[in-house]
Amino acid sequence: MILIRLIIILWFWGFIALALVATSNYLFSTDPERGRRFSGRLSTALLWPIAILSAAGRARLRRGH
């Protein structure tokens, strides 16, 4: 039970951090494709625990795509 609670807390704070970064990039970008990129980054923020399990997922998190 404690391990599940710890995993949920880590996922939550990771999501908050990645979502704040995505929102900041969206607000301060002038790129016309920023809406599409924002939604992709929010999807990555939701699935970040799965992304860190693969090399491609870690690279995507590092690049911010």
Image: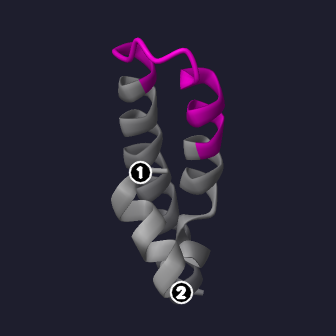
How many other residues sit within 10 Å of disc 1, few (<14), some (14-19) or many (≥20)? some
How many other residues sit within 10 Å of disc 2, few (<14), some (14-19) or many (≥20)? few
Residue 57's place in the image compared with 1, above or below, is above
Task: Determine the image quadrant of residue 26.
Answer: top left
Q: Please name the amino acid that badge 2 sits on.
A: Ser
Front residue (pair 61, 11)? 61
Front residue (pair 57, 14)? 57
Residue found 57% across the figure and 35% down from its top: 37
Is label 1 in a helix, a strand or a loop?
A: loop
Residue 30's place in the image compared with 17, above or below, is above
Which quadrant is home to the N terminus?
bottom right
- Which span is picked out in magenta? 26-40
Residue 18 rendering spot, x and y as whole percentages: 42, 47
Question: Where does label 1 land, which residue?
Answer: 64
Residue found 41% across the figure and 11% down from its top: 30
Residue 24's place in the image compared with 61, above or below, is above
| Residue 26 circle label | none
- 64 is within the stretch colored magenta: no
Question: Where does label 2 land, which residue?
Answer: 54
Q: Please name the amino acid that badge 1 sits on.
A: Gly
